[in-house]
Amino acid sequence: MDIIIVCHTEFGFVHNRRIIFDKSAKEGVTKGVLTLVNIADKYSAKLTFALMPEAADYFPKRINSEIGLHIHPGWEEFQVDGIKYYAGDAYLRKHCSQSSTSTFLTDYSYEEQLNMIDMGKKYLESKLGVQIKSFVAGRWAINNYTVQALVKVGITHDFSATPYTKLFNSNWAKLPRICLPYNPDKEDYQQRGELPLLIVPVSQTLFWGNVSPEIIPMVGFPWLKASFLEYYRRGVPLFHICLHSSAMTDPYFISAMDNFLYFISSHKNINFKFGSEIGEYKTASFKTYILPYIFNINKDIMKTFFRIVRNKLK
Ligand SMILES: [Zn+2]
């Protein structure tokens, strides 16, 4: 089984087990990246850092990982627990034409998206001396224009897909929960097609949630382990973990990530890969395998499950 770890690399800190993407918290990049590298090294795991252009100056030197592009367009204020912060990329805001303040790429024209993606890619390449092949959209929101812009600038891998979910401007509802990488169609990025870009979806736990140490406060660690076991025992050839560099400044999430990689690497035939090393697999569909979850039903997941059901009934 191939394992990829895609880290959205941006400023921020952790408050009450939630990330506040505060731009003054540079340690979200400086310390967060190094901490994740140290954990990954223990298990010979490879990392893909999807980096915001505004954070390029703070990305640690001599990191032997893949670097991709992460774009948060626009500029808007958000609040968590009364703490205010801004979303958007200061570098792109200054250097690109953005007709809106929206923090969703999908609210921009093809030309504007192309401009941001091209500018961000070139900036990271010149700053860090690397070739950028991988991409993650802020807030998981892409559309057909995004896909066309990625192909145009030569990006080969996209890690923005969160199958089975539709949230705000992000729509991945057509993808099955357990979804293998695919080349999208020009007219519909959620359909298989011929475009020279591989969409590599984030692995999903049963009912709800990207596979990430960041969901542990909601679902509990046993549930996350169960998600790995489901993919592993069903013979799914790829397990895609996502997280934010800023989570790696907090002891709770640091130890969660460490424990998760320890658990994964204790299994046979595990191959950690960089995101852009992933190719297509033989087409297959996978049925839900519920057993690992049943043994791991706990208080946290029941609370989360009932919350989801309640919200759906509203
Ligand atoms: Zn982000």
Image: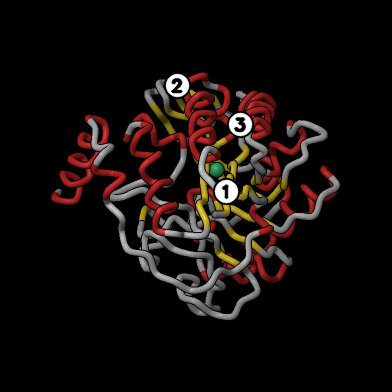
Please name the amino acid that badge 2 sits on.
Answer: His
What label sits on residue 21 in the rendered view? none
Which of the marked residues, 3 or 1, is nearer the chain's N terminus?
A: 3
Q: Secondary structure at mark 2?
A: strand
- Find out if the beta carbon at label 2 lies less than 8 Å from the nearest ligand 1 atom: no
Q: Residues within 10 Å of mark 3 (few under 14, many from 20)?
A: many
Residue 164: name its quadrant. bottom left
Secondary structure of the residue carrying numbered label 3: loop
Q: Identify which residue is drawn at 46% across, 40% down.
A: 212
| In the image, residue 104 above or below residue 245 | below
Eye-nearest disc, 1 or 2: 1
Find residue 305 and report its image quarter. top left
Q: Nearer the viewer, mark 3 or mark 1?
A: 1
* Residue 270 image label: 1
Q: How is the image coloured?
A: secondary structure
Q: Residue at x 61, y 50 (%)?
A: 271
Is residue 33 visible in the rendered structure shown here?
A: no
Q: Which mark is residue 11?
A: 3
Q: Residue at x 54, y 60 (%)?
A: 200
Percent x, y of residue 176: 37, 65
Marks 1 and 2 in Cβ contact (< 8 Å): no
Q: CA distance from mark 3 to mark 1?
A: 31 Å
Q: Give the x, y percent position of residue 94.
A: 70, 45
Q: Quadrant of ligand 1?
A: top right
The Cα–Cα distance between marks 2 and 3, rounded to whole angstroms, is 14 Å
Instruction: Give the residue type at disc 1.
Output: Ile
Q: Secondary structure at mark 1?
A: loop
Which residue position holds label 2?
15
Task: Answer above or below: position of 191 versus 93.
Answer: below
> Amino acid type of disc 3?
Phe
Place of residue 28 in the rendered image (x, y in percent of width and height, measured from the top left): 61, 28
